[in-house]
Amino acid sequence: MLFSKLVNKAKKLLRKLTLVHRLGVLVLVFLGLVFILPALTQQPVTLNLLMTAPDAQPWQQGLVKDFQEKNPGIRINIVEGPNATNLLEDLYSSSFLLGDSPYDLVNMDVIWTPKFAAAGWLLDLTNKVTPKELAAFSPKDVEGGTYEGKLYRMPIRSDAAMLYYRKDLLDAAGYKPPETFQQLMEISQALQKDDKIDWGYVWQGRQYEGLVAMFIEVMQGYGGFWVNPQNLEVGLDKPETLNAIAFLKNTIKEGVSPPGVTTYQEEETRRFFQSGKSAFLRSWPYVWPLANQPDSAIKGKIGITTMVHAPGEQSGACLGGWGLGIAKSSRHPEEAWKAIQYFTSEEAQKQFILSAGYVPSRRDLFKDPEIVAKYGHYPKLLEVVDSAVLRPPIAQYSQASDILQRYLSAALTNRMTPERAMKAAADETRRLLNAGKA
């Protein structure tokens, strides 16, 4: 009805105009239809992003909601995947291998970057961000997003394992947090002898990726290494690696760690520690808020520190964390980069941390007064992140990890001697890397 009235008025106006004026008006109307109407009717660009189901809700309620309000022309469609990160990796890999992947943004665990980049599935982001901008992030998190000198992943949240300890028990007995493997053993045994605790130290010993993450910290603490990404040298059969295995086996032999520790994953060890059964725990930052819940047996009784090491060596914290890349097959790379810029911005990260409790990838946020007021352990957590060690950034990482898991588990459970197990692991890893070179 309104449209008809407007048309009639336009007709009357045109009758009053000269021919030249009429032509001018018609040209203006035509130009408006060509340029203005598509802009008014254009649909928002939709970016697809796959992530684990537990992460989807806080993302939708926080980061995505805020981004879409500031960018009405871009929508973020979060596809909820399985909880297990290895299954999520399989979904991403399958979609890229089959071609025409539906995903624009790629949410990556730090260990996926080399594989995805080497396969040609990601856009090179190197020229999209300046060195000054990257300097605001944790150097290890940035390193975890690079492959062969190029940047493929912007870090959005960090993660690094640490040593949790019963601060109340150590303070009462006059102990400082341990710095060496020997101190960890001695404090554990003293607390056990005084019946202050059932067990000293729990760690993840089951055959899975968590075993590898735990073990590279012990290797680092003894001065060892797994694979040198610069020259692909393998260090699994070196004395430092055997010393690392000897320490872990000794925790069980001496009764500091429970016999079942070789079957534990993160949650088994977290519940063990949180129930008050052990003095020390090697685990990730997610444990802190859970261990300090009102119904926790150790609420307000714990502290964190960097992992222990041998005298003269450095501690290592296995780097975890997630970051965002852009699929090379995306039809909307510029919009995807705009989303990454916002999600990794200081403003967005701060709100996300305050609402969801994740670990920031920007260094300044570890000491932000508002964040520290809520998470008082974050300044200490920055020390842990700064001591982070990366799992080797090699394209064949998944296969190399599987090799180490199998033989390390065999050594820890006495199915093979450590020497024989690590020689076999080293030989298989060298064959794998040599095949990749060929």
Image: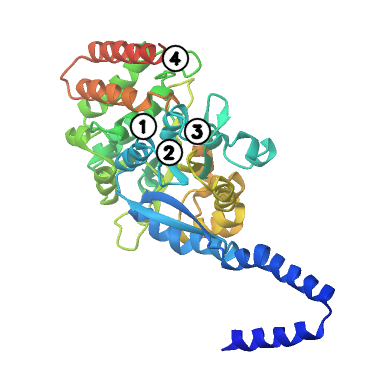
Residue wearing tag 3: 144
* Percent coordinates x, y for residue 430 in the rendering: 35, 12
Q: Are marks 3 and 1 in contact (CB under 8 Å)?
A: no
Q: Earlier in the sequence, mark 4 or mark 1?
A: 1
- The amino acid type of the residue labelled 1 equals Ala
Q: Earlier in the sequence, mark 4 or mark 2?
A: 4
Q: Which mark is residue 232?
A: 4
Residue wearing tag 1: 213
* Front residue of 127 and 8: 8
Q: Is residue 300 shown to the viewer in this render?
A: no
**Residue at image location 67% in from the left, 35% down from the top:** 131
**Residue at image location 63% in from the left, 89% down from the top:** 5
Residue at mark 3 to residue at mark 2: CA–CA distance? 9 Å
Residue at mark 4 to residue at mark 1: CA–CA distance? 19 Å
Which color scheme did the rendering employ for the protein?
Answer: rainbow
Name the residue at the left extreme.
Answer: 415
| Res. 300 image quadrant | bottom left
Which callout, 3 or 1, points to the residue nearer the camera? 3
Residue at mark 1 to residue at mark 2: CA–CA distance? 9 Å
**Residue at image location 56% in from the left, 56% down from the top:** 348
Label 1 environment density (alpha carbons within 10 Å; few <14, some 14–19, many ≥20)? many
Q: Earlier in the sequence, mark 3 or mark 2?
A: 3
Q: Which mark is residue 320?
A: 2
Tally of marks: 4
**Residue at image location 78% in from the left, 71% down from the top:** 23
Which element is circle 2 on?
Answer: loop
Residue 192 appears left or right of 224: left
Label 4 environment density (alpha carbons within 10 Å; few <14, some 14–19, many ≥20)? some
* Front residue of 421 and 195: 421
Which element is circle 4 on?
Answer: loop
| Res. 142 image quadrant | top right
Which callout, 4 or 1, points to the residue nearer the camera? 4
